[in-house]
Amino acid sequence: MAENKTNTDRIKRIYDLCELHFGDVRFVGIKYHKKIGWIAKAQFDDGFENLTADGITSVEALRNLKNRVKKIIKRYNAV
């Protein structure tokens, strides 16, 4: 039987991915913006720019951020 993922699980997964590939992570989270919708954000300690992604739902925003992180990792590994 499949377990239902929570946003906490998704945030933890993104945090672990970022920490493994980029180093120190300050923050991974999500917030609601009235005009934009849901925004997922990852902040790093060592001057690396913040990564953000948005979506209509919180789940979609987190999924978009995870895909963006994975795309960057894939690009790094290809070089």
Image (cartoon, grey):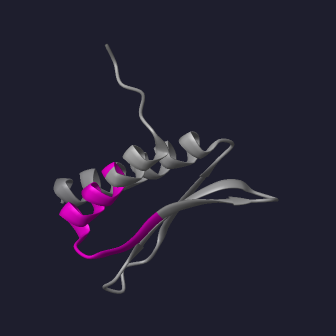
Q: Which residues are magenta?
A: 13-28
In this picture, residue 38 sits left or right of residue 26: right
Q: Nearer the viewer, residue 36 or 16?
A: 16
Q: Is residue 46 above or below residue 29?
A: below
Residue 20 in percent (x, y) is at 19, 62
In the image, what residue occupies the spot 32% across and 49% down? Answer: 13
Q: Nearer the viewer, residue 64 or 32?
A: 32
In what quadrant of the picture does the N terminus appear? top left
Q: Is residue 77 above or below residue 7?
A: below
Q: Is residue 45 above or below residue 18?
A: below
Residue 65 in percent (x, y) is at 47, 52
In the image, what residue occupies the spot 18% across and 55% down? Answer: 77
In this picture, residue 52 sits left or right of residue 32: left
Residue 17 in percent (x, y) is at 26, 55
Residue 43, picture quadrant: bottom left
In the image, what residue occupies the spot 21% across and 63% down? Answer: 21
In what quadrant of the picture does the C terminus appear? bottom left
Q: Main secondary structure of the magenta part?
A: helix
In the image, what residue occupies the spot 56% across and 48% down? Answer: 61
The residue most toward the top is 1
Q: Is residue 24 magenta?
A: yes
Q: Is residue 43 magenta?
A: no
Q: Nearer the viewer, residue 70 or 35?
A: 35
The residue most toward the bottom is 47
Residue 72, picture quadrant: bottom left
